[in-house]
Amino acid sequence: MKAERYVGQIRKLDRLITNKLIEREQLEAVAMKMTAPIGVDRVQSSGSSQKMADTVYRIYDLETEINNAIDKLYEVKKEVLATIEQLDDVEYDILHRIFIQYMEIQDIADEYKRSYSWVTDKRRSALKNLQKVLNERN
């Protein structure tokens, strides 16, 4: 696996979890607007007779997907962190800030009191060295 894709797994999983949480919130909002039929003589025109139950099942399924994604995120993050910790301190810190903390390159440059290009060069170098670590593993 390419180094950038390897560390990028974290952000992808994080987005997946965020999107699933939004989906769950939307379903919960729909469920709160639903009402159960009051009388048994009510005529149903179309759709499922158990819309509320179907929605609850969907929410449950989403909750399971969210929990599985969180577990996977934890495992992937743990593995990625252990791998980038093998780099030198600056390269580790740059990759950590970009791919774990989601910091912008300019913000990192400001904190280091360096130029934007210095950070991008360090990032490129760190990814190159990370690729070497990944290749040695395989």
Image (tube, grey):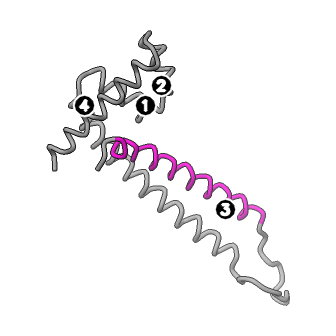
Contact? badges 4 and 3 (CB < 8 Å): no
| CA gap, disc 4 and disc 3 | 40 Å
Report the predominant secondary structure element of the magenta stretch.
helix
Question: How busy is the neighbourhood of tag 1: few (under 14 within 10 Å), some, or many (20 plus)?
Answer: some
Residue 137 in the image: above or below residue 51: above
| CA gap, disc 1 and disc 3 | 33 Å
Which mark is first along the chain, 3 or 2?
3
Q: Residue at x 31, y 42 (%)?
A: 3
Residue 10 on the magenta segment: yes
Label annotation for residue 98: 1
**Which residue corresponds to mark 3?**
27
The kind of residue tagged 3 is Leu
Which mark is first along the chain, 3 or 1?
3
Q: Which residue is drawn at 51% across and 21% down?
A: 106
Foreground residue, 3 or 86?
A: 3
| CA gap, disc 2 and disc 1 | 7 Å
- Secondary structure beneath dot 4 equals loop
Q: Which of marks 4 and 3 is in front?
A: 4
* Residue numbers of the magenta segment: 4-33
Contact? badges 2 and 1 (CB < 8 Å): yes
- Secondary structure beneath dot 3 equals helix
Q: Residue at x 24, y 31 (%)?
A: 85
Residue 27 locus on image (x, y percent): 66, 62
- Secondary structure beneath dot 2 equals helix
The kind of residue tagged 4 is Glu
Label annotation for residue 85: 4
Question: How busy is the neighbourhood of tag 4: few (under 14 within 10 Å), some, or many (20 plus)?
Answer: some
Q: Nearer the viewer, mark 1 or mark 3?
A: 1
Label annotation for residue 105: 2
Q: Nearer the viewer, mark 2 or mark 3?
A: 2
